[in-house]
Image (tube, helix red, strand yellow):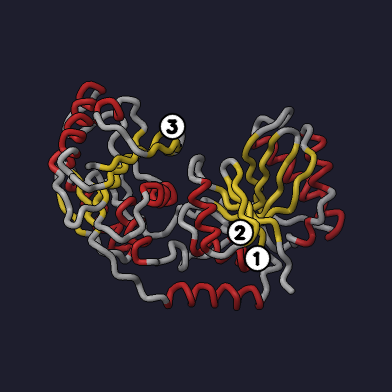
Amino acid sequence: MPERHRLIATAAFGTEDLLAAELSELGLAGVRRRRGAVEFRGTLVDALRACIHVRTAMRVLRSLGEVEAAGPDSLYESLRSLPWAEHLDLTHSFAVEVSGQTEGLTHSLYAAQKAKDAIVDSLRAVLGGRPDVNVREPDVRIVLHLRAGRAEVSLDVAGESLHRRGWRSRPHPASLKETLAAAVVLGSGWRGELPLVDPMCGAGTIAIEAALLAAGRPPNARRRFGAERWPGFGATDRRALASLRAEALARPPREHPPIRACDRDPEAVEAARENARQAGVQLDLSVADARELGPSYPPGYVVTNPPYGGHAGGGGGQKQLKTFFHALGRNARGLSGHTLAFLTGSPAFESAFGMRPVGRRKLFNGPIPAQLLVYRVQ
């Protein structure tokens, strides 16, 4: 019987409940929320299924357990005692990533170096040699999370962040990560039954993630995962993963209402057009001003990420930004029956927009504190 593991899917702060719901919908066991992550239990195949299907997870990790990390020497001794020869050999490279901090271990690069030394010394004692370290493209990525004198030690099943869907050929300034865009769509309450428009679409990330969701297309069915490079990833695992991929790709896309994406910047619209083509989704794209957005029929959703500062509607500065938000709110009052969701990192947005939200979710857009504000227009 395949071994069951403690698995951890990491998420952006404020999106943990959305990720937990996705994992539960996949039928995965033991789903439990943590800060910045969701735990569940399952086999390696279950972890790979999560990598293929979940939209809001940044990574999926297989936990090797928690060890003492009361300082550099404590971390070294704890990690050296783990059975690394079960997970690494002399022909596969590895890298160590560290997040968090604890007393005596406040610098991630120093903690990663101590961890690397411990792993290399452990393998040398057992195997008589050491594997290479490859920080850019390791065969096995080891992740340590430090907190309160302890270190959670995991193997990265995904291999790199799951926000890298592979369709973004045309970036655009201030583009959202794909995982955050998916969380914004899910957090708005939209599930593909009604029309959706992003009137400030930039490179099209929100609209593309909405189209993938509406069509029922798994976001990561075609990408390679880190576990495929592990020494112990055998023929049975490869067959199971091939079956998961084939099943995901064989599903016909669901029909859904139109999804529109607009922007005042023609270059942004062209970037969105190319990205949509790479993603294989259909968007109704146009150059348009968000302050002149008209209603959809039937009334649907407006989901967007307005500017936080700098240029807005042809100007810059906070005064013009507030004027822009006020114009958005004035226009929004004419969208009777619509649901509006704005991801905003501007403290000026809510008062200038001039409507009372029915929902509020605290998020981070990279390092920027933000809110997802949801409105229903009567």
Mark closest to the chain's N terminus, 3 or 1 = 1
At numbered mark 2, what does the secondary structure look like: helix, strand or loop? loop
- Lower sequence index among marks 2 and 1: 1
Q: Position of residue 121 (x, y in %)?
A: 81, 49
- Kindly report the distance in space between the C-alpha atoms of the residues bearing marks 2 and 1: 8 Å
Q: Position of residue 307 (x, y in %)?
A: 28, 35
Amino acid type of the residue tagged 3 in the rendering: Pro
* Residue at point 52%, 65% (across, down): 224
Query: Are the residues tagged 2 and 3 within 8 Å (C-beta)?
Result: no
Give the residue type that dot 2 points to. Val
Name the image quarter holding residue 2. bottom right
Dot 3, crowdedness within 10 Å: few (<14), some or many (≥20)?
some
Residue 209 drawn above or below residue 117? below
Of the image marks 2 and 3, the number of the one nearer the N terminus: 2
As drawn, which residue projects farthest toward the right? 125
**Mark 1 lies on residue:** 44
Q: Disc 2 designates what residue?
A: 157
Residue 369 is marked as 3
SS at mark 1 in the image:
helix
